[in-house]
Amino acid sequence: MPRTMFDKIWDAHVVRDEPGEIPMLYIDRHLTHEATSPQAFAGLRERDLRVHRPESVVAVIDHNVPTVPGRRLVDVVDDQSVMCIETMEENARDFDIPLLGMNDEEQGIVHVIGPELGLSLPGMTVVCGDSHTSTHGALGIFAVGIGTSEVEHVLATQCLLQQKPKTMHIEIGGELSPGVTAKDVALAVIGRLGTGVGTNHVIEFSGSLVSSLSIEGRMTLCNMAIEAGARAGMVAPDDATIEYVRGRRYAPTGELFERAAEQWKQLAGDPGAHFDAVHEVDLGTLTPQVTWGTNPGMVTDVTSTVPDPAFEDDPVARLETEHALEHMGLTPGQRLQDVGVDVVFIGSCTNSRIEDLRLAAQYVSGRRVADGVRAIVVPGSMTVRRQAEKEGLADVFHAAGFEWREAGCSMCIAMNGDRLSAGERCASTSNRNFEGRQGRGGRTHLVSPATAAATAVAGRFADARDL
Ligand SMILES: CC(C)[C@H](C(=O)O)[C@@H](O)C(=O)O
Ligand code: SF4
């Protein structure tokens, strides 16, 4: 029977699948971070259990770290964060797990460092106690976010009990013009299909637009699959994937790599494979996207206007729109390009890789951040940071008036000192815009790095294609 890519990876990892039981899946790589692991390790200690396969686990500190240059423990913002960081250090030491700590050369956001270091490889099962684990799926991986009790279970057994998710195929056609990116694709797809479309499904993305994306662009798309409600997102490995993986620090080398690459090419779904759900989205010539509301599906073209709830037929949607506009401090019919911003944040596991920074720098180069705007760039990893410095991107950002930070989750999630104040409006390259996500009372608009850069310069939402 023809199989989907997900079926192939699933089949290769099922340890036990008995009627009436939840299937048990073998896990190849377990990534862990300080925010969701303390209780899991505490559970192991209580029961006097060891980590079953420490060499498959890598720990990183990313959520609670300050990103101020030259950061030290005294810069950590609160006791809770200090506790998370110190506990991660202690657990890594006691359980023999490699740790990318606050001042490690390779530290970064867990979903940036996984692919970057070759810790996540095509065909693997990858878990992390974090919803955006889907990012790794861009390489053709079943990468799934798990809860803290599951983290404990995987640490102890290397296996995960997992109800088999349904499969969904989203085929995306259309083309990208300069200044329009994978982030715009992700937002447009969620805008059209809704934030619940992927519920209980693993989404396989394909189509001419997806194939044309760089591997980092595919990561942005799979990262946002979670915001479409999915368990995971995936793209089948192709030649670009193999070239991306080649030479990564923990990737196989020589003959072993060639043999692995042959296998990776077989992972793509078979023609005629059955999906539980199928969607086709033709994005035509896509325009840069900006969210105007409080979920990622409340999105429109940067050239457009804030929607008017009066034109909304569905009473529930009308109420949601009204509520969102109230929180966002926006008026129905207002042109987005007339809306001024206070903060621009370029970072997060959605958009903080080297290509994102190159793109943003391209629009910032030779220009200045508008008066009154606080603009920060937070590279996704210290490796990305060094590369950006080497390429002169950091100088471009500095010269324009951006703050240039150290790696971490930063202002994507208000738990490390980087946050919005009440009422502040932010153009953010992150993935979540619910109320309070970037700080209580803060207003988040999700955009691409190109739009963020153009907006920083204009001081209001701007179309990078006009620069
Ligand atoms: C802290 C963690 C549980 C959380 C997640 O799982 O997604 C965070 O990374 C986020 O983006 O909200
Ligand atoms: S960057 Fe944001 S979305 Fe990504 S793992 Fe960190 S907090 Fe979660």
Image: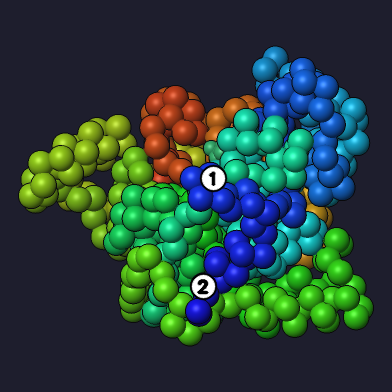
The label shown at residue 4 is: 2
* Residue 33 seen: yes
Q: Secondary structure at mark 1?
A: loop
Label 1 is placed on what type of residue?
Ile
**How many dots with numbers?**
2
Residue drawn at the location 84% of the way across and 44% of the way down = 53
Residue drawn at the location 34% of the way across and 70% of the way down = 279
Q: Are marks 2 and 1 in contact (CB under 8 Å)?
A: no
**Rendered location of residue 245, percent (x, y):** 76, 70
Q: Secondary structure at mark 2?
A: loop
Asked whether mark 1 and ligand 1 are closer than 8 Å, the reply comes as no
Q: Quadrant of residue 419?
A: top right
Of the pair 309 and 362, the residue shown nearer to us:
309
Q: Quadrant of residue 375?
A: top right
* Residue 465 seen: no
**Rendered location of residue 361, percent (x, y):** 62, 62
Q: Quadrant of residue 155?
A: top right
The label shown at residue 22 is: 1
The label shown at residue 85 is: none
The reply, left or right, for residue 268 in relation to residue 263 is left
Residue located farthest toward the top when viewing the structure as drawn: 79
Image depth: mark 2 or mark 1 in front: 1
Mark 2 and mark 1: Cα distance apart in space: 21 Å
Residue drawn at the location 51% of the way across and 72% of the way down = 4
